Amino acid sequence: MAHALVSPKDAPNPPAPEQRVVVANKHSEKFVGTLHHGGSNKVVVLCHGFAACKDDSIMIDLASALTKQGISAFRFDFSGNGESEGEFQYGKYRKEADDLHSVVSYLYQEKYDVAAIVGHSKGGSVVVLYASIYGDVPMIVNLSGRFYLEKGVEERLGKEFMDRINKEGYIDVINKSGKVLYRVTKESLMERLNTDMHAASLSISKECRFFTIHGSADKIIPVEDAYEFARLIPNHKLHVIKRANHGYTSHRKQLCGAVIDCITSNEAGSTPP
Protein backbone atom coordinates (compact mmCIF):
# COMPACT_ATOMS: atom_id res chain seq x y z
CA MET A 1 0.00 0.00 0.00
CA ALA A 2 2.98 2.29 0.50
CA HIS A 3 6.27 2.72 -1.27
CA ALA A 4 9.25 4.98 -0.69
CA LEU A 5 9.60 8.02 -2.92
CA VAL A 6 12.79 9.58 -1.61
CA SER A 7 15.67 8.14 0.36
CA PRO A 8 18.85 9.95 -0.74
CA LYS A 9 21.32 8.37 1.67
CA ASP A 10 24.35 9.67 -0.17
CA ALA A 11 23.30 13.31 -0.41
CA PRO A 12 25.04 15.79 1.88
CA ASN A 13 22.37 16.99 4.40
CA PRO A 14 19.66 14.72 2.94
CA PRO A 15 16.02 15.60 3.59
CA ALA A 16 13.92 13.26 5.70
CA PRO A 17 12.89 10.25 3.63
CA GLU A 18 9.39 10.57 2.24
CA GLN A 19 6.92 7.78 1.62
CA ARG A 20 3.80 7.90 -0.52
CA VAL A 21 0.85 6.33 1.29
CA VAL A 22 -2.65 5.54 0.00
CA VAL A 23 -5.49 5.18 2.52
CA ALA A 24 -9.12 4.28 1.81
CA ASN A 25 -12.01 5.90 3.69
CA LYS A 26 -15.30 4.21 4.60
CA HIS A 27 -16.73 5.29 1.22
CA SER A 28 -13.95 3.28 -0.53
CA GLU A 29 -12.41 6.50 -1.81
CA LYS A 30 -8.63 6.41 -1.88
CA PHE A 31 -6.75 9.44 -0.70
CA VAL A 32 -3.07 10.10 -0.98
CA GLY A 33 -0.61 11.20 1.68
CA THR A 34 3.10 11.76 2.18
CA LEU A 35 4.76 10.35 5.27
CA HIS A 36 7.93 12.17 6.34
CA HIS A 37 10.06 9.91 8.52
CA GLY A 38 11.56 11.85 11.41
CA GLY A 39 13.50 9.00 12.95
CA SER A 40 10.88 7.87 15.47
CA ASN A 41 7.38 6.39 15.46
CA LYS A 42 5.95 9.62 16.90
CA VAL A 43 3.92 11.26 14.11
CA VAL A 44 1.90 14.44 13.64
CA VAL A 45 -0.92 14.53 11.07
CA LEU A 46 -1.24 17.74 9.00
CA CYS A 47 -4.61 18.82 7.55
CA HIS A 48 -4.89 21.40 4.76
CA GLY A 49 -7.54 24.06 4.32
CA PHE A 50 -10.38 24.77 1.88
CA ALA A 51 -9.60 24.06 -1.79
CA ALA A 52 -5.97 23.43 -0.85
CA CYS A 53 -3.94 20.22 -0.73
CA LYS A 54 -1.11 18.43 1.07
CA ASP A 55 1.41 20.33 -1.09
CA ASP A 56 0.33 23.70 0.29
CA SER A 57 3.46 25.53 1.48
CA ILE A 58 2.24 25.62 5.09
CA MET A 59 1.90 21.82 5.12
CA ILE A 60 5.38 21.37 3.62
CA ASP A 61 7.02 23.87 5.98
CA LEU A 62 5.40 22.27 9.04
CA ALA A 63 6.48 18.79 7.93
CA SER A 64 10.05 20.02 7.53
CA ALA A 65 10.05 21.70 10.95
CA LEU A 66 8.71 18.57 12.62
CA THR A 67 11.22 16.18 11.04
CA LYS A 68 14.06 18.47 12.09
CA GLN A 69 12.87 17.80 15.66
CA GLY A 70 12.92 14.04 15.07
CA ILE A 71 9.11 13.87 14.77
CA SER A 72 7.50 12.18 11.76
CA ALA A 73 4.79 14.05 9.83
CA PHE A 74 1.94 12.89 7.62
CA ARG A 75 0.30 15.35 5.23
CA PHE A 76 -2.53 14.19 2.98
CA ASP A 77 -5.24 15.31 0.57
CA PHE A 78 -8.80 15.18 1.84
CA SER A 79 -11.14 13.34 -0.56
CA GLY A 80 -11.97 15.48 -3.58
CA ASN A 81 -8.75 17.50 -3.19
CA GLY A 82 -5.26 17.15 -4.66
CA GLU A 83 -4.46 13.58 -5.69
CA SER A 84 -7.25 11.98 -3.70
CA GLU A 85 -10.39 10.39 -5.12
CA GLY A 86 -13.87 11.74 -4.53
CA GLU A 87 -15.83 14.81 -5.56
CA PHE A 88 -14.80 18.23 -4.28
CA GLN A 89 -17.52 19.63 -2.04
CA TYR A 90 -18.03 22.98 -0.35
CA GLY A 91 -19.03 21.79 3.13
CA LYS A 92 -18.45 18.17 4.22
CA TYR A 93 -16.83 19.05 7.57
CA ARG A 94 -18.08 15.79 9.09
CA LYS A 95 -16.91 13.81 6.05
CA GLU A 96 -13.44 15.32 6.34
CA ALA A 97 -13.38 14.43 10.04
CA ASP A 98 -14.20 10.86 8.97
CA ASP A 99 -11.40 10.98 6.35
CA LEU A 100 -9.05 12.08 9.10
CA HIS A 101 -10.17 9.19 11.27
CA SER A 102 -9.27 6.77 8.47
CA VAL A 103 -5.77 8.29 8.40
CA VAL A 104 -5.35 8.14 12.17
CA SER A 105 -6.60 4.55 12.28
CA TYR A 106 -4.16 3.58 9.51
CA LEU A 107 -1.22 5.12 11.38
CA TYR A 108 -2.19 3.39 14.63
CA GLN A 109 -2.43 0.09 12.74
CA GLU A 110 1.07 0.68 11.40
CA LYS A 111 2.27 1.07 15.01
CA TYR A 112 2.81 4.82 14.84
CA ASP A 113 2.23 6.96 17.91
CA VAL A 114 -0.10 9.72 16.69
CA ALA A 115 1.04 12.55 18.96
CA ALA A 116 -1.10 15.34 17.49
CA ILE A 117 -3.32 16.53 14.66
CA VAL A 118 -2.69 19.97 13.17
CA GLY A 119 -5.24 21.65 10.89
CA HIS A 120 -5.07 24.97 9.03
CA SER A 121 -8.09 27.15 8.14
CA LYS A 122 -10.96 24.77 7.23
CA GLY A 123 -8.66 22.01 8.46
CA GLY A 124 -8.62 23.81 11.82
CA SER A 125 -12.40 23.61 12.06
CA VAL A 126 -12.25 19.96 11.00
CA VAL A 127 -9.81 19.03 13.78
CA VAL A 128 -12.09 20.70 16.35
CA LEU A 129 -14.96 18.58 15.05
CA TYR A 130 -12.70 15.51 15.03
CA ALA A 131 -11.76 15.98 18.68
CA SER A 132 -15.42 16.28 19.64
CA ILE A 133 -16.37 13.06 17.83
CA TYR A 134 -13.46 10.65 18.18
CA GLY A 135 -11.24 11.74 21.06
CA ASP A 136 -8.51 9.25 20.14
CA VAL A 137 -5.59 11.71 19.73
CA PRO A 138 -4.04 13.36 22.81
CA MET A 139 -3.33 16.76 21.22
CA ILE A 140 -5.04 19.03 18.69
CA VAL A 141 -3.53 22.17 17.14
CA ASN A 142 -5.97 24.50 15.38
CA LEU A 143 -4.30 26.98 13.02
CA SER A 144 -6.65 29.84 12.06
CA GLY A 145 -9.78 27.69 12.14
CA ARG A 146 -13.21 29.26 11.73
CA PHE A 147 -15.60 29.23 14.69
CA TYR A 148 -18.49 31.11 13.09
CA LEU A 149 -19.19 28.91 10.06
CA GLU A 150 -22.09 31.10 8.98
CA LYS A 151 -19.55 33.84 8.25
CA GLY A 152 -17.39 33.91 5.12
CA VAL A 153 -20.16 32.40 2.98
CA GLU A 154 -21.43 35.68 1.52
CA GLU A 155 -17.89 36.65 0.46
CA ARG A 156 -17.65 33.50 -1.68
CA LEU A 157 -21.22 33.08 -2.88
CA GLY A 158 -22.63 36.61 -2.99
CA LYS A 159 -25.21 38.49 -0.93
CA GLU A 160 -28.27 36.67 -2.29
CA PHE A 161 -26.80 33.20 -1.89
CA MET A 162 -29.75 31.72 0.03
CA ASP A 163 -32.30 33.00 -2.49
CA ARG A 164 -30.21 31.68 -5.37
CA ILE A 165 -29.61 28.26 -3.88
CA ASN A 166 -33.26 27.86 -2.86
CA LYS A 167 -34.30 28.71 -6.42
CA GLU A 168 -31.70 26.75 -8.38
CA GLY A 169 -30.57 24.13 -5.87
CA TYR A 170 -26.92 25.02 -6.40
CA ILE A 171 -24.48 27.87 -7.04
CA ASP A 172 -21.53 27.60 -9.41
CA VAL A 173 -18.49 29.52 -8.20
CA ILE A 174 -16.61 30.95 -11.18
CA ASN A 175 -13.29 32.74 -11.58
CA LYS A 176 -12.64 36.01 -13.42
CA SER A 177 -12.37 34.23 -16.77
CA GLY A 178 -15.74 32.53 -16.31
CA LYS A 179 -14.43 29.05 -15.53
CA VAL A 180 -16.47 27.06 -13.00
CA LEU A 181 -14.21 26.33 -10.03
CA TYR A 182 -16.68 24.23 -8.07
CA ARG A 183 -20.41 23.76 -7.49
CA VAL A 184 -22.03 24.47 -4.13
CA THR A 185 -25.11 22.32 -3.59
CA LYS A 186 -27.86 23.23 -1.15
CA GLU A 187 -27.03 20.08 0.83
CA SER A 188 -23.35 21.01 1.21
CA LEU A 189 -24.16 24.61 2.12
CA MET A 190 -26.66 23.57 4.77
CA GLU A 191 -24.18 21.05 6.17
CA ARG A 192 -21.75 23.91 6.76
CA LEU A 193 -24.36 26.24 8.22
CA ASN A 194 -25.68 23.50 10.54
CA THR A 195 -22.26 22.44 11.85
CA ASP A 196 -22.24 23.74 15.43
CA MET A 197 -18.71 24.65 16.49
CA HIS A 198 -20.00 25.91 19.85
CA ALA A 199 -21.41 22.50 20.75
CA ALA A 200 -18.33 20.74 19.31
CA SER A 201 -15.99 22.89 21.40
CA LEU A 202 -17.89 22.19 24.61
CA SER A 203 -17.89 18.43 24.01
CA ILE A 204 -14.10 18.07 23.67
CA SER A 205 -12.64 16.06 26.54
CA LYS A 206 -10.55 17.94 29.08
CA GLU A 207 -8.02 15.12 28.66
CA CYS A 208 -7.33 16.41 25.14
CA ARG A 209 -4.64 19.09 25.12
CA PHE A 210 -5.85 21.75 22.70
CA PHE A 211 -3.93 24.64 21.17
CA THR A 212 -5.15 27.42 18.89
CA ILE A 213 -2.73 29.58 16.89
CA HIS A 214 -4.07 32.58 14.96
CA GLY A 215 -2.71 35.68 13.25
CA SER A 216 -3.83 39.05 14.59
CA ALA A 217 -4.00 40.47 11.04
CA ASP A 218 -6.05 37.59 9.56
CA LYS A 219 -8.59 39.16 7.18
CA ILE A 220 -10.12 35.85 6.04
CA ILE A 221 -10.95 34.42 9.47
CA PRO A 222 -10.72 37.11 12.17
CA VAL A 223 -8.82 36.45 15.38
CA GLU A 224 -12.10 36.79 17.32
CA ASP A 225 -12.88 33.22 16.24
CA ALA A 226 -9.77 32.04 18.07
CA TYR A 227 -10.94 33.69 21.28
CA GLU A 228 -14.22 31.77 21.08
CA PHE A 229 -12.36 28.46 20.90
CA ALA A 230 -10.25 29.58 23.86
CA ARG A 231 -13.36 30.48 25.84
CA LEU A 232 -15.15 27.18 25.33
CA ILE A 233 -12.63 24.34 24.98
CA PRO A 234 -11.73 22.92 28.43
CA ASN A 235 -7.97 22.30 28.23
CA HIS A 236 -6.90 25.09 25.87
CA LYS A 237 -4.01 27.43 25.22
CA LEU A 238 -4.14 30.30 22.74
CA HIS A 239 -1.19 31.83 20.90
CA VAL A 240 -1.79 34.92 18.74
CA ILE A 241 1.00 35.81 16.29
CA LYS A 242 1.08 39.58 15.96
CA ARG A 243 0.62 41.01 12.46
CA ALA A 244 0.37 37.54 10.87
CA ASN A 245 -2.15 37.06 8.06
CA HIS A 246 -4.22 33.96 7.29
CA GLY A 247 -1.41 32.23 5.41
CA TYR A 248 1.34 33.42 7.78
CA THR A 249 3.10 34.72 4.66
CA SER A 250 5.70 36.79 6.52
CA HIS A 251 5.47 34.83 9.77
CA ARG A 252 6.08 31.25 8.68
CA LYS A 253 9.07 30.82 10.98
CA GLN A 254 7.02 32.01 13.97
CA LEU A 255 4.19 29.68 12.99
CA CYS A 256 6.46 26.63 12.73
CA GLY A 257 8.13 27.54 16.02
CA ALA A 258 4.77 27.89 17.77
CA VAL A 259 3.57 24.50 16.47
CA ILE A 260 6.81 22.81 17.59
CA ASP A 261 6.41 24.42 21.03
CA CYS A 262 2.88 22.98 21.25
CA ILE A 263 3.97 19.48 20.24
CA THR A 264 6.92 19.41 22.64
CA SER A 265 5.25 21.16 25.60
CA ASN A 266 4.20 19.25 28.69
CA GLU A 267 0.71 20.61 29.16
CA ALA A 268 -1.73 23.01 27.55
CA GLY A 269 -3.33 24.67 30.55
CA SER A 270 -5.84 27.48 30.32
CA THR A 271 -5.13 30.85 28.80
CA PRO A 272 -7.89 33.46 29.19
CA PRO A 273 -8.95 35.51 26.14
Image: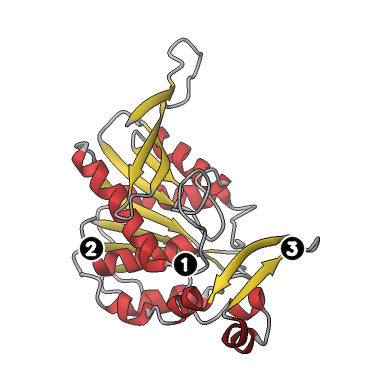
Q: Nearer the viewer, residue 169 or 18?
A: 169
- Residue 145: assigned label: 1
Q: Position of residue 220 (x, y in %)?
A: 61, 70
Question: Which residue lies under the disc numbered 3?
Answer: 175
Q: CA distance from mark 3 to mark 2?
A: 37 Å
x and y percentages locating residue 56 in the rendered image: 56, 47
User: Which residue position holds label 2?
Assistant: 134
Q: Tag 2: Cα neighbours inside 10 Å, few (<14), some, or many (≥20)?
A: few
Badge 1: few (under 14), some or many (20 or more) residues near its Cα, within 10 Å? many
**What amino acid is at disc 3?**
Asn
- Give the quadrant of residue 227: bottom left
Q: Earlier in the sequence, mark 1 or mark 3?
A: 1
Q: CA distance from mark 1 to mark 3?
A: 24 Å
Determine whether 225 is above or below 20 in the image: below
Q: Residue drawn at (61%, 87%), measured in percent from left and top?
A: 167
The amino acid type found where label 1 is placed reads Gly
Left or right of 4? Residue 88 is right
Q: At which x and y percent is residue 94?
A: 36, 67
> Which is nearer the N-term, disc 2 or disc 1?
2
Q: Secondary structure at mark 3?
A: loop
The secondary structure type at the circle numbered 2 is: loop
Quadrant for the C terminus in the image: bottom left
Residue 32 can be seen, yes or no? yes
